[in-house]
Each structure stands twice: as structure tokens, then as C-alpha cells.
Image: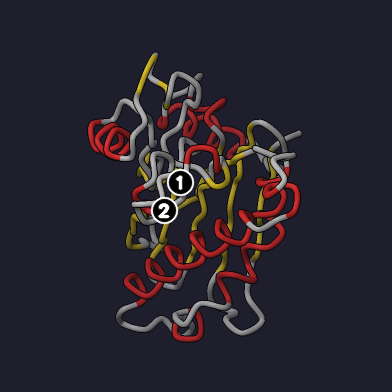
Amino acid sequence: MEDDHLSMLKFPEAPDISLFGVFDGHGGDLVAHHVAREFPRHFQQTKEFPTLTGNPADFEARAKAAFEDSVMSIDREMRQLQEVESGQDQSGSTSVMVLVGPSCVVCANTGDSRAVMSRDGVVVALSEDHKPFNPEEKERIEAAGSHVKFNRVNGDLAVSRALGDFVYKRCESLPDEHQAVTAFPEVMTERRDPEKDEFIVLACDGVWDCMTNQEVVDFVRSRLSAGEKNLI
């Protein structure tokens, strides 16, 4: 298995927020496992984290900044790992995470794993896929000196954003967020509706390649209605 996940029902310092994530590794499992294990530490070390508890008025902006800082921080940390520096490991991983607060859900996505929420049985998309053929993604890839061929970065990588994959992050004249493949997350926020919101699904692209967002919501909802509880 090159995949991993993260599930924190609460933080000791912030018991009113939860963090969940799915990491779809490729080319090896080092990056996915490292992110699942170490990301909470990076998130808690951001300057924004101490201000998230208590549902502040600017929770969404603070959570967005915390996600951006911590995702880029852990990517820089992995670049320094001995296995990566030596070239022994060239793996990468997508990442989709949700921070569930008292009044909203904040999703940080890097790659083509995906998050959706069921609101009274109707799907609410919490993320957008990052594919090399998307116009904005393609523009960044080409500006960094790479190209899109067969809908892949340099004809090889099927996602345009990922943690790890440092072979695509070698343009020294550009900052990390503008590399051909960047770890920089896209952050989306959805206000919670306590009367209608039911559940959130985080999954790798293998699920979304076979089912639409609404089909996944319908599938999970039908199993929950039938009394199934262990759907992870």
C-alpha cells in the first residue's frame, strides 16, 4: 500500500476542531506515510493554530493560512530526508484534508484526491482536482519549463500538484508554489448547516474515476441508512 490517512477527532489544545486526511502515494510510500504521520505537528506549529480554537470570526482565513504554511513546510522537510537527497526515493503523494470547526469545514487539496459532503442527500463539492490539462495548471507547468503531453506533466505524472515528486520541483528561479508540480494546496471553505449536513467523504482518485460525486454520496448514505457504521 502506497496510501495513508489521517484522523484526529480533536487536538489537545483545540478540542473543538477535527482534522482528517487521505494521501494517495505514487512511486513509493515514503511521502504518503511521512505526511500522515508528521502533518499534525506541522499544522500545530503554525502561528495560526493557537488562534483557531473557540471559533473566532476569522476562522476561515486563519485555517487557510495554517494549511498553506504547514503543507509547504512538510514538503520542504521531506526534501531534506536522506532517502530523498540521495535520490533513492522519488515518490510523491496527493493530499486532501478537511478541518472541521464549529461553524465551517475547510478543505485543503493538493492533487486529484477529492472531498465531498452530503447535505440532506445532495452533494457539496469541497475540492477541485488538479490535473495537468486544466488551463491554470498547464500555464504554471509551462512557465516552470515543463510541458503537458498525453495529459501528464512531461508525459509522465498524471497530477499537477503533489507533495514530494521533487524531480518536478527543480526550477531554481521560481518559488515553491510556482514549480511545475507544486505542493501548494487549494483551500475551499463551506459553512456548516447543522440541520442538513450528514457526512464527508475523502477518497483517492480510484473512487472518483468510477463514480460521480453524487453516486458516492448516494452509496454511503444508503449504507448508513441500512445501519452500517464501519465505512472507513
Q: Is residue 182 left or right of residue 60?
A: right
Left or right, 222 with reference to 184: right
Q: Using a 10 Å C-alpha cutoff, classify the residue at mark 1 as few (fewer than 14 neighbours), some (14 to 19) or many (20 or more).
A: many
**The C terminus - image quarter:** top right
Residue at image coords 68%, 40%? 231
Residue 110: assigned label: 1
Give whichever of 231, 71 is nearer the camera.
71
Residue 72 rendering spot, x and y as whole percentages: 48, 60
Q: Which is nearer the N-term, disc 2 or disc 1?
A: 1
* Residue 122 appearing in the image: no
Q: Nearer the viewer, mark 2 or mark 1?
A: 2
Dot 2 falls on a residue whose secondary structure is: loop
Distance CA(mark 2)–CA(mark 1): 7 Å
Q: Are marks 2 and 1 in contact (CB under 8 Å)?
A: yes
Q: Secondary structure at mark 1?
A: strand
Q: x%, y% of residue 9?
A: 64, 66
Residue for point 58% across, 39% down? 225
Give the percent coordinates (x, y) of residue 93.
59, 41
Rendered residue at 46%/50% (across/down): 183
The residue indicated by pointer 2 is: 184
Q: Is residue 12 above or below residue 198?
A: below
Mark 1 residue type? Thr
Q: Amino acid at mark 2?
A: Phe
Q: Quadrant of residue 138?
A: top left
From the viewer's perspective, is residue 162 above or below residue 37?
Answer: above
Q: Is residue 16 above or below residue 232?
A: below
| Residue at image location 41% in from the left, 54% down from the top | 176
Question: In the rendered image, which quarter contains the N terminus?
Answer: top right
